[in-house]
Image (spheres, grey):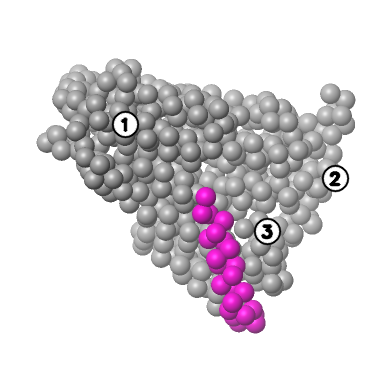
């Protein structure tokens, strides 16, 4: 999508008006009418097509931009398919049930949210993938919270916070590598520099999650014991059920492409499942497509373990393609380029440059819903401006992550927001107020930009 060329040069008033109208349509539909995001985004696409036709743009050029936008998300589409397969295969093999069972032995209602935040942070840092962390360990923690009758909204907020801490700080993360390479900064220098905003955000989030954690009660402990016994009765709880997780981590550390990593881990999980149950080939194929269905007779366990499959990702994939198609039209009509160009032309001070780049990354996430584009576009639009005010490139790469990477899961129609909602079963707007790490990161990066603290200037960079 980044290479889509505009066929129109709208005025700043027109670009702003169209953008505001799109945000209004989507926001009102989601918040006021509680509609699924597909419909308002489709309305926004129709609005953009009508605008283009009114301005004299041939329909075939609009259609070309629409297709190009959707094409930019095809790698994500296939990744989602494999994540759906991964979840169902991990259910079959007992990987997720074993993680849940082990988690119940480690996690108590006391400091529950803080423990969830720390554990997901460690796993996210280890594998460098926020969505994989959410889809595996996150699902397990949501299950625990459901059984212990603990707030699913705060639990989801802790999961998202921890997963995106790992995504942001892991050298294995694609967004971390993208942000550093976009402005020509050494990867580990980029990670160290992010520590100035990330560590305070992590500590504050940890304290808040600890304070919000509920008090333990005997009733909840009894419920957990009953649930643990129910998991044992499935016959799927074994130490070797964790092998698919180990394989996933090892392949990720070995920098094997994500799609192949998910495929191999799923294959191992399917192989292990034959130790638990005598599935036929037809049953395995059906589970991989339609998802795993638990039939223990215990409602809570069946609800938790019945999930996954390629089919479960179709809602997500449809929405991703619609959102990216809308982005393709925004680029084709020159609306994004116009807004970015106007921002760049009025920036003179260090504080305004940092704030504007952060708001741009946030705005692209809100407008287009695409994490990678928020990094790519912000990097290109502000790289020269950072040089003009004497700031080192690693300041920009930090802002791109603080306001780009971790903001995407807070947008209901974004790629990450859609995926997390579909996997955890908690809506984006429900967990948003409790995703403290994701909320604090852009605030801190703008605050440090205004104070000048932790900023590195180009002269200092050259002396190092």
Which of the numbered marks, if any, corresponds to residue 299? none
Q: Is residue 87 above or below residue 76?
A: above
Residue under label 1, please give it. 271
Q: Residue at x 62, y 74 (%)?
A: 61
**Mark 2 neighbour density, 10 Å: few (under 14) some (14–19) many (20 or more):** some
- Asked if residue 423 shows in the view, the reply is no
Q: In the rendered structure, does residue 276 fall within the stretch colored magenta?
A: no
Judge left or right: residue 450 versus residue 27.
Answer: right
Please tell me which residue lies in front, 426 or 228.
228
Q: In the rendered structure, does residue 55 fall within the stretch colored magenta?
A: yes
At which x and y percent is residue 217? Answer: 23, 20
Query: Is label 2 in a helix, a strand or a loop?
Result: helix
At which x and y percent is residue 350? Answer: 78, 42
- By secondary structure, the bulk of the magenta-drawn segment is best described as helix
Which badge, 3 or 2, comes first in the chain's sequence?
3
Query: Is label 3 in a helix, a strand or a loop?
Result: loop
Position of the N terminus by quadrant:
bottom right
At which x and y percent is residue 414? Answer: 49, 51
Instruction: Point out the frontmost of discs 3 and 2.
Output: 3
Which badge, 1 or 3, comes first in the chain's sequence?
3
Which of the numbered marks, if any, corresponds to residue 3? 3
Q: Residue at x 87, y 29 (%)?
A: 462
Span colored in magenta: 53-75
Q: Residue at x 51, y 54 (%)?
A: 74
Report, in whole angstroms, how far the alpha carbon at label 1 lies from the one at label 3.
42 Å
Position of the C terminus by quadrant:
top right
Q: Is residue 166 above or below residue 63?
A: above
Report, in whole angstroms, how far the alpha carbon at label 3 lies from the one at label 2.
25 Å
Which of the numbered marks, if any, corresponds to residue 388? 2
């Amino acid at each position: 999508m980044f290479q889509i060329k505009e066929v129109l040069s709208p005025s700043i008033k027109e670009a702003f008006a169209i953008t505001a109208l799109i945000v209004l349509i989507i926001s009102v539909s989601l918040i006021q009418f509680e509609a699924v995001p597909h419909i308002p985004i489709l309305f926004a696409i129709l609005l953009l097509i009508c605008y283009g036709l009114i301005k004299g743009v041939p329909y075939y050029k609009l259609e070309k931009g629409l297709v190009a936008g959707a094409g930019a998300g095809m790698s994500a589409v296939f990744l989602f398919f494999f994540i759906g397969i991964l979840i169902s295969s991990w259910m079959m093999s007992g990987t997720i049930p074993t993680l849940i069972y082990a988690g119940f032995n480690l996690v108590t209602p006391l400091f529950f949210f803080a423990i969830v935040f720390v554990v997901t942070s460690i796993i996210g840092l280890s594998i460098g993938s926020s969505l994989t962390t959410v889809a595996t360990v996150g699902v397990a923690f949501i299950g625990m919270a459901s059984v212990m009758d603990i707030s699913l909204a705060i639990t989801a907020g802790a999961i998202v916070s921890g997963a995106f801490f790992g995504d942001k700080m892991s050298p294995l993360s694609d967004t971390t590598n993208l942000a550093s390479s976009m402005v020509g900064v050494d990867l580990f220098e980029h990670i160290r520099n992010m520590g100035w905003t990330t560590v305070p955000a992590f500590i504050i989030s940890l304290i808040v999650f600890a304070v919000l954690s509920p008090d333990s009660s005997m009733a909840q402990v009894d419920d957990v014991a009953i649930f643990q016994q129910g998991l044992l009765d499935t016959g799927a709880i074994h130490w070797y059920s964790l092998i698919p997780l180990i394989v996933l981590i090892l392949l990720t550390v070995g920098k094997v492409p994500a799609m192949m990593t998910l495929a191999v881990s799923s294959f191992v999980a399917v192989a292990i499942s034959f130790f638990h149950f005598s599935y036929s080939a037809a049953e395995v194929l059906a589970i991989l497509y339609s998802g795993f269905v638990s039939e223990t007779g215990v409602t809570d366990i069946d609800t938790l373990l019945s999930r996954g499959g390629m089919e479960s990702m179709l809602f997500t994939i449809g929405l991703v393609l619609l959102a990216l198609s809308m982005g393709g039209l925004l680029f084709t009509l020159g609306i994004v380029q116009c807004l970015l160009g106007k921002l760049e032309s009025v920036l003179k001070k260090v504080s305004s440059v940092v704030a504007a780049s952060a708001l741009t990354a946030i705005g692209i996430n809100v407008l287009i819903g695409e994490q990678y584009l928020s990094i790519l576009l912000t990097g290109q639009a502000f790289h020269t401006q950072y040089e003009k005010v004497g700031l080192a490139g690693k300041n920009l790469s930090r802002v791109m992550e603080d306001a780009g990477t971790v903001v995407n899961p807070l947008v209901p129609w974004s790629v990450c927001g859609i995926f997390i909602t579909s996997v955890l079963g908690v809506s984006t707007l429900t967990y948003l107020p409790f995703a403290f790490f994701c909320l604090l990161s852009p605030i801190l990066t703008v605050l440090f930009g205004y104070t000048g603290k932790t900023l590195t200037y180009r002269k200092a960079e050259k002396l190092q």
